[in-house]
Amino acid sequence: MKRRAGTLLATLALLLAGLLAGCASPPLAPGEAPWTAGRLSLRIEAQAERAAQSVSVGFELRGDGSGGELRLNSPLGTRVATARWAPGVAVLDQGQGEQAYSSLEALSQEALGEALPLAALPDWLAGRPWPGASHTNGVAGLSGFEQLGWQVDLARRGEGWIELRRSAAPAVRVRVKLDEAS
């Protein structure tokens, strides 16, 4: 069970990273959305009977919160999993068959025991609030905004770094380093 949870956590981390919009990599065919690539670290603080969890992964993404594909890679570049999603479904393939979920949030619920606002991430990392919920700009010296209980720090976005923090238990910190455009 712990191994499955660890694999799902790594997969979720890559899924989170992939949803974070950023820089294009391979050339696009007509009608194709751009690919985004980079690295992600995810840390979930310990809570009650659950130990702290952390993972660092690489990703390649094409799409947005409503539909796309995410290729998940280990730090050594080995493909770990591929996720595809569209309205009403998220499919995860870890090389041993596909597992379907009703949404990206359902996938995170299964992996972490809680749903994360994955649909908002592409907008957040593009440097803007998600249009699906209210937000507050410049909270407590934050160079960015707060939305859905998350602080989106854009202070180093020009260097390709974006940080997301949730203070509510369990506290979560996501750091993304986007690759430069090719």
Image: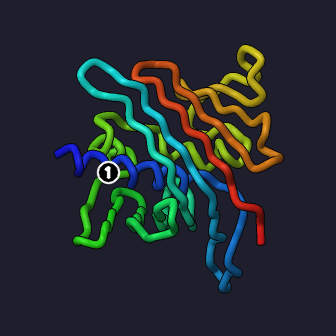
Which residue bears the numbered disc 1?
8
x 65%, y 32%: residue: 152
Q: Nearer the viewer, residue 56 or 92?
A: 56
Q: Residue furthest top?
A: 140
Residue 139 is situated, as x and y percent measured from the top left of the image, at: 71, 18
Identify the coloring.
rainbow
Name the residue furthest left. 1
Residue 130 figure quarter: top right
Numbered marks: total = 1
Q: Is residue 42 left or right of residue 8?
A: right
x 32%, y 68%: residue: 93
Q: Position of residue 33 (x, y in %)?
A: 63, 71
Q: Is residue 25 left or right of residue 147?
A: right
Foreground: 21 or 79?
A: 79
At x 74% / y 30%, what residue is drawn? 144
Helix, strand or loop at label 1? It is helix
Mark 1: which amino acid? Leu
* 18, above or below 156, in the image: below
Q: Residue furthest bottom?
A: 29
